[in-house]
């Protein structure tokens, strides 16, 4: 697709009939903006935008979409607000901890702009509900943080012929693009195959600079506004890459693979991303945190001898750890490095039990018949054994 074709995309929505007095006052800075004006604002009023995830990227996106005057906002999120979210998910507050993220986000949106119609989808997006949910909207914003959902969003949008704005953040880095199968490349042209399971850490594992969410989220909203109103040149066929540490932006061209067939149906995205190979924590031999506490007491008394491995990242270990554990990040063990002595009894823990289950399964396959997963990880340890320690 050429730059001229991208610039010539028609507006996504027809304009609403009119703006009332309150709307004219609220959106006056848009109305006097050359090249935007009343017609663009009327298109925003008529637009229906679905935001997937009320987290790091969804927080600024929802607030700026509401402030801009998008008439209907849909929110997909089945999670609850945690204290660790507040470092970057600015749509939530301390009063919302423990509450539904979707409802907390709705309350913040309506407090900012009561003229917006907010629709909640408090479900986990999957192949069984994506097409039905997407069909009620003009445009999708994908702020999710896992590859299985990203491919699901891409395929559902392509099947329905809808554009979507995609954003991704990790540590100091962010990426943004617009995907629209009818007019240009899609996420599958950028990433034809998913990365190997566990090779790319999540934000919960690798961390993220909080303000990066606002920087990338605001660009996503900018693209949404351009698509809705037909203003400017969208990022279709272009990938914008941001490095917050260096404060640099660069653009990478993206083209549709001519040999890639159109998506015609949804599939099993967990299996496609290889997540079926990650052990179910219920099927890996394990112990509870209270059992571990007893074992550690026995080791301290000289009655037992075993290794306790912490397979999280160094930053996580610095926040909170179990005394007497040895830090060996998951990736190093899976690469065959820093393995315990063969024949030793080994207990493995992580944040909540997922990564440690994977490592335990790996060790058992490698001949460590006495390797056990610590179920619930450090979060259960803090809840049940050392509640004075911080959780994250």
Image (spheres, rainbow, N blue to C red):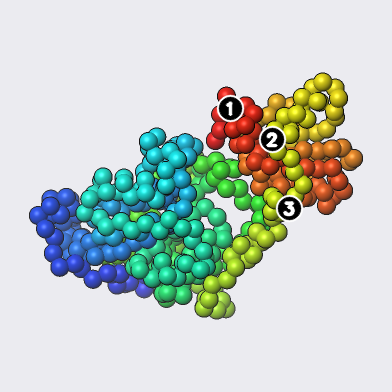
Q: Are marks 2 and 1 in contact (CB under 8 Å)?
A: no
- The answer to whether residue 317 is seen in the rendering is no
Tell me the distance, in whole angstroms, between the alpha carbons under discs 3 and 2.
Answer: 17 Å
Tell me the distance, in whole angstroms, between the alpha carbons under discs 1 and 3.
Answer: 28 Å
Q: Which mark is residue 289?
A: 2
- The answer to whether residue 147 is seen in the rendering is yes
Tag 1 residue? 387
Instruction: Say which element carries label 3.
Output: helix
- For the N terminus, the quadrant is bottom left
Left or right position of 249 against 271: left
Residue 102 at x, y percent in the picture: 39, 51
- In primary-sequence order, the first of circles 2 and 1 is 2
Q: Nearer the viewer, residue 190 or 348?
A: 348
Residue 86 at x, y percent in the picture: 43, 38
- In primary-sequence order, the first of circles 3 and 2 is 3
Tell me the distance, in whole angstroms, between the alpha carbons under discs 2 and 1.
Answer: 12 Å
Q: Are marks 3 and 2 in contact (CB under 8 Å)?
A: no
Residue 38 at x, y percent in the picture: 16, 61
- In primary-sequence order, the first of circles 1 and 3 is 3
- Categorize mark 3 by other alpha carbons within 10 Å: few (<14), some (14-19), many (20+): few
């Amino acid at each position: 697709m050429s730059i001229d074709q991208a610039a010539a995309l028609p507006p996504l929505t027809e304009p609403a009939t009119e703006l009332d007095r309150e709307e004219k006052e609220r959106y006056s800075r848009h109305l006097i903006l050359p090249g935007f004006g009343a017609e663009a604002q009327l298109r925003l009023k008529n637009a229906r935008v679905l935001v997937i995830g009320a987290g790091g990227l969804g927080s600024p996106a929802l607030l700026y979409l509401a402030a801009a005057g998008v008439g209907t906002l849909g929110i997909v999120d089945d999670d609850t607000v945690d204290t660790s979210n507040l470092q970057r998910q600015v749509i939530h507050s301390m009063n919302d901890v423990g509450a539904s993220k979707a409802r907390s986000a709705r309350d913040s949106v309506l407090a900012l702009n009561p003229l917006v119609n907010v629709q909640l989808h408090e479900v986990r997006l999957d192949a069984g509900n994506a097409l039905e949910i997407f069909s009620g909207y003009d445009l999708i914003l994908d702020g999710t943080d896992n590859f299985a959902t990203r491919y699901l969003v891409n395929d559902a949008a392509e099947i329905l012929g809808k554009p979507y704005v995609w954003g991704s953040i990790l540590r100091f880095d962010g990426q943004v693009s617009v995907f629209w199968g009818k007019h240009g490349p899609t996420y599958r042209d950028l990433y034809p195959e998913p990365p190997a399971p566990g090779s790319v850490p999540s934000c919960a594992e690798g961390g993220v600079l909080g303000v990066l969410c606002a920087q990338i989220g605001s660009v996503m909203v900018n693209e949404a506004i351009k698509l809705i109103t037909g203003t400017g040149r969208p990022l279709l066929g272009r990938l914008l890459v941001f490095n917050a540490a260096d404060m640099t932006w660069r653009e990478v061209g993206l083209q549709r693979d001519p040999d890639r067939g159109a998506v015609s149906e949804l599939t099993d995205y967990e299996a496609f991303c290889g997540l079926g190979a990650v052990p179910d924590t219920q099927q890996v031999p394990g112990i509870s945190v209270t059992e571990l506490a007893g074992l550690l007491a026995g080791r301290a008394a000289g009655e037992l001898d075993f290794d306790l491995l912490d397979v999280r990242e160094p930053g996580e270990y610095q926040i909170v750890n179990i005394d007497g554990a040895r830090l060996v990040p998951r990736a190093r063990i899976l690469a065959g490095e820093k393995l315990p002595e063969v024949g030793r009894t080994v207990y493995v823990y992580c944040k909540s039990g997922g990564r440690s289950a994977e490592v335990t399964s790996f060790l058992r396959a490698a001949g460590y018949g006495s390797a056990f997963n610590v179920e619930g990880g450090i979060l259960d340890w803090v809840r049940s054994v050392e509640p004075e320690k911080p959780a994250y």
